[in-house]
Image (tube, coloured by chain):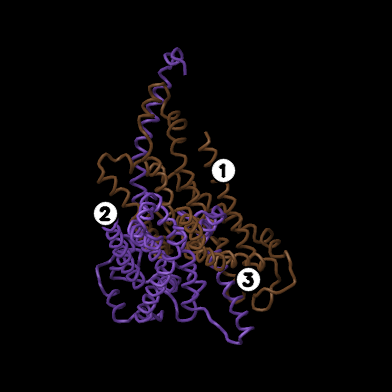
Chain colours: A brown, B purple
Amino acid sequence: MAFRLRRLRENGSLLALPTVAWLVVFFVLPLAVVLVFSFMSRGRGGVAILPFTIEHYERTFGVFFIILRRSIGLAALTTVICLLLGYPLAFFISTRRRRVLRQIALFLVILPFWTNFLIRTYAWRILLGEEGTINGVLLSLGLIGEPLSLLNTQLAVVIGLIYGFLPFMVLPIYASVERFNFRYVDAAHDLGANDIRTFLRVVLPLTLPGVLAGCALVFIPSVGAFVTPDLLGGAKGLMIGNLINKQFGGSGNMPLGSALSIVMMAVVMLSLLVYIFANRREAGD
Amino acid sequence: MAPAAQSLINQGSMRRNRAVRRLGQVGLWLNPVFAYFFLWAPILILVLFSFNESKSVASFTGFTLKWYNNILNNVMGAERAFSTEIMLNAFRNSLFVGAVATAIATVLGTMIALAMARGRFPGKSLIDSLLFLPVVIPEITQAISLAIFFKVAFDWIAGISGERVFPGFHTIIIAHVTFNISFVAIVVRARLADMDPQLEEAAGDLGANPWRTFWRVTFPLILPGVVSGALLAFTLSLDDFVITFFTSGVGTSTLPVFVYGLLKLTVTPEVNAISTIMMVLSTLLIGISLAMQGRTASRA
């Protein structure tokens, strides 16, 4: 028996080996190469050459700081609006009395999600364009004299990001609300708390894990967004993802692109740490 | 709040409380109306204008199928070189890449899930973060890291052997396997966590060797998880654009990469029609796979 157990243990690590090797070679190693590249100089054709330099980080926090700040700002705005939109929606879904209605309400949030992200984003080009549907309707109603420029703005990027990631906010909050016992609300009222106090002291703390998870799930992909600002943002809505993409084109600069990626990853890791810390404190209470 | 203070609540604050509640009730009804409208309007409008008689997306002038007809007959707006053949080829590429990447990722993901659940070896928390990172890292970072890595690796190979390797299916497949492993592992581990490890011990006590125990006891029990993981991997693979865009070579574009090329250009009715077809297809595909998942899960 002991002999068999020992062999199983050995088998355990042997079983992990191929996958770990794959991830080390094709995930860790490439990231390490990016880190090294980010400290190298730009050669002809945008490739990385020696000597080592920190000029790309200087540019990231210098001329490109405005784009870094914009990316974080737009992602934060997206997260806040998703929360304001998604929190009541999650409550709406989970408070439907009949199970079928709950399932349909949830399904209606998930179903648009099954469409390819590119196409969902493209749909907003139809709506927001100069000759698009929104302008068409507003013009024919006589509400505006000239078409509004909605496409290729930061507004368009935020709308696209909210549209892309709203279900990421709704689903974890929904899971939290499902577990929430509504008798606590009655108890709080019986004890004399008004609605606002009940919400802030009872409902919100108990659904906070879902809120935190939702915020992390929306903020992280929003910061690194590439498709949404590319299709909807134009020059005014340029985000760090587009800037990175540009460094890999014809007149690119791979070391600069690498440095931008490393900084973006640091932002993501930082927000992840905030999430883990907040979650721990929440669980510790 | 003390009971004495409670009795002192004046009329004003009660009226305010009622107003707050009324406002909350209205808000709780308005919010879903707006949210569902927001989620569905863009998709429905896209579908609607794929049937629009005129090229405009500003107003609907009449019903037509001519844009769908144009796609089938390979006629597209004069401003664009589009070919149904290229699109179908891209779709075939997608299926091929998805199938191969899913097969490899499912095997590797299941192996690591088993090792993490049953094995006892040091460095497990390190492997945990190794599995967690590909899920949370921004797509574009993973995409460019692989693009740079392949470039460096191919330069190195060319330096040694003098033969130049170019990106193609192999690079896309490697990339897809890399981001899929974690998702498969997560799904299979969830299934393993629900499983009673005593069943395996019982099989061992009854004289089955570990290999036999795995195939006769463990594998049948985790199969629904493995199938779900594989379906998830296949869906992610078919859907991926960013990572494929950076790792694909000439002639190996997948469907999303091809579609991106179309969408980057101006809005045309044919693109709306293609988008509508893709929407219907992917919804069908996921619907079928979910139905199958439900069946395998209920059978187990």
Residue farthest along the bottom direction in this orientation: B162
Q: Amino acid at mark 3?
A: Met
Q: Which of disc 3 and disc 1 is earlier in sequence?
A: 3
User: Dot 1: few (<14), some (14–19), or many (≥20) neighbours within 10 Å?
Assistant: few
**Residue A277: which disc?**
1
Q: Are marks 3 and 2 in contact (CB under 8 Å)?
A: no
Residue at 48 percent across and 53 percent down: it is A2
Mark 1–mark 3 Cα distance, whole angstroms, equals: 34 Å
Q: Nearer the viewer, residue A276 or B112?
A: B112
Q: Position of residue A122 (x, y in %)?
A: 41, 64
Q: Amino acid at mark 1?
A: Phe
**In front of the other: label 1 or label 2?**
2
The residue identified by callout 3 is A254
Occupied quadrant, residue B223: bottom left
SS under mark 2: helix
SS under mark 3: helix
Chain that bears disc 3: A
**In front of the other: label 3 or label 2?**
2
User: Dot 2: few (<14), some (14–19), or many (≥20) neighbours within 10 Å?
Assistant: few
Q: Are marks 1 and 3 in contact (CB under 8 Å)?
A: no
Residue at 40 percent across and 59 percent down: it is A135
